[in-house]
Amino acid sequence: MEQAKDKQVLLEVQHLNVQFHLKNGKKAKVVDDVSFVIHKGETVALVGESGSGKSITSLSIMRLLPMPPGEITKGDILLNGKNLLHYKNKEMSRIRGNEVSMIFQEPMTSLDPVFTIGNQIMEAIRRHQKVSKKQAREMSLQLLKEVGIANAEKIITEYPHQLSGGMRQRVMIAIAMSNNPQLLIADEPTTALDVTVQAQILKLMMKMKKEQHSAILFITHDMSVVAETADRVMVMYAGQIVEEAPVREIFLQPKHPYTAALLKTMPSLETEMTRLPSIPGTVPPAYALPNGCRFAPRCPFVMKHCRQVTPETRHIQHNHSVRCHLFTEEGVLAHDGERSFT
Ligand code: SF4
């Protein structure tokens, strides 16, 4: 894992609030006061189970959130100091695919079934760069080679359905990286792939990131992917960031009980397990959040206080913050000091 060499801020999300208008006329707050930064060249993982608000956060950054039913009610999203929420749609399409790119879990939803792979990569290049068709073709072939596709001359003439899932994801990476974006948002990019292909794709993404000096925001529910890729980790639960720290600290000294529970769902070489443990219960829906701490109904450390008072984010150490009543500003257990979940 590579630490961010350059500490310059690339992306700054400030107090982002997103709500959805439900069919019954009610509103559901799916992202609640989310703030974070990504530095140039850094890989940051945003982790949490489905329904935690990770994908809505990333779609908001890309300005791809369906509005309605979604609505950004508050907050700012600054890329290189410029607020993406102030751009007109046309300006945003210039930024999308150029300064910020995104890859999704299922490439079939992003690739157009009626155009060849070559056409789609060339189109992505020519949308943002003034090059001839011949040059774009050469660049496409080169990109396909860089993402590990040996028979690029043949693949360029094929259609998405003719490729395997792993090959399609490689093509998506080629498209996403075609204009040398400063930020790549990868939303569960390997979830639909088998384990061997997953490892290859992760390796490829990290190689491309290094070569192009891009930053990556990795959206995932899989702590193994986090361990392989991230410099820093943000854990999201029920629309809020509940813990943030460098990757090593998250794995060695998780503070929030939810982070600790997520880590226990990781496969381990030491323990023989026929079935991986899962966290009992489910993420509460955004239209029916519990009072106090949102994790309280599932937390093995819940106290009476937790069900009444919402915990604030506490900076317990330099670059480690947690939203849990168990911790004081000094990072020690505020209650029941003997208990430990690590
Ligand atoms: Fe558990 Fe209470 Fe901490 Fe919430 S605030 S995670 S319920 S200990």
Image (cartoon, rainbow, N blue to C red):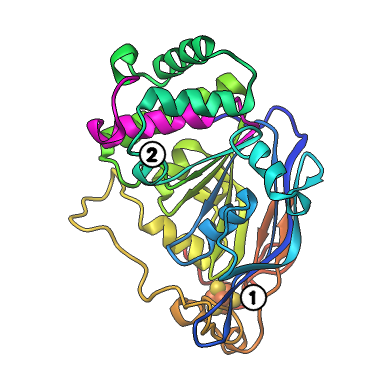
In the rendered image, the vertical position of residue 92 relative to residue 340, given as above or below: above
Q: CA distance from mark 2 to mark 1?
A: 49 Å
Check disc 2 and report its element: helix, strand or loop: loop
Percent across and percent down for residue 262 are 43, 59
Percent across and percent down for residue 161 are 25, 36
Q: Of callouts 2 and 1, which one flags the residue occurring earlier in the amino acid sequence? A: 2
Does 169 lie within the magenta span?
Answer: yes
- The residue shown at (66%, 85%) is 309
User: Residue 97 versus residue 205: which sits nearer the camera?
Assistant: 97
- The residue shown at (44%, 29%) is 120
Residue type at mark 1 is His
> Residue 101 lies in what quarter of the image?
top right
Residue carrying label 2: 112
> Residue 216 lies in what quarter of the image?
top right
Q: Which mark is residue 142?
A: none
Residue carrying label 1: 325
Is residue 342 visible in this depiction of the protein?
A: no
Q: For ligand 1, tell me if the residue under mark 1 lies within 8 Å.
A: yes
User: Residue 81 versus residue 98: which sits nearer the camera?
Assistant: 98
User: Residue 217 versus residue 318: which sits nearer the camera?
Assistant: 217
Check disc 1 and report its element: helix, strand or loop: loop
Q: Is the residue marked by circle 2 packed among few (<14), some (14-19), or many (20+) residues within 10 Å?
A: some
The region drawn magenta spans 156-184
Residue type at mark 2 is Asp
In the rendered image, the vertical position of residue 184 relative to residue 211, given as above or below: below
Furthest toward the right, the residue is: 81
Question: Closer to us: mark 2 or mark 1?
Answer: 2
- The residue shown at (63%, 52%) is 63
Furthest toward the left, the residue is: 274
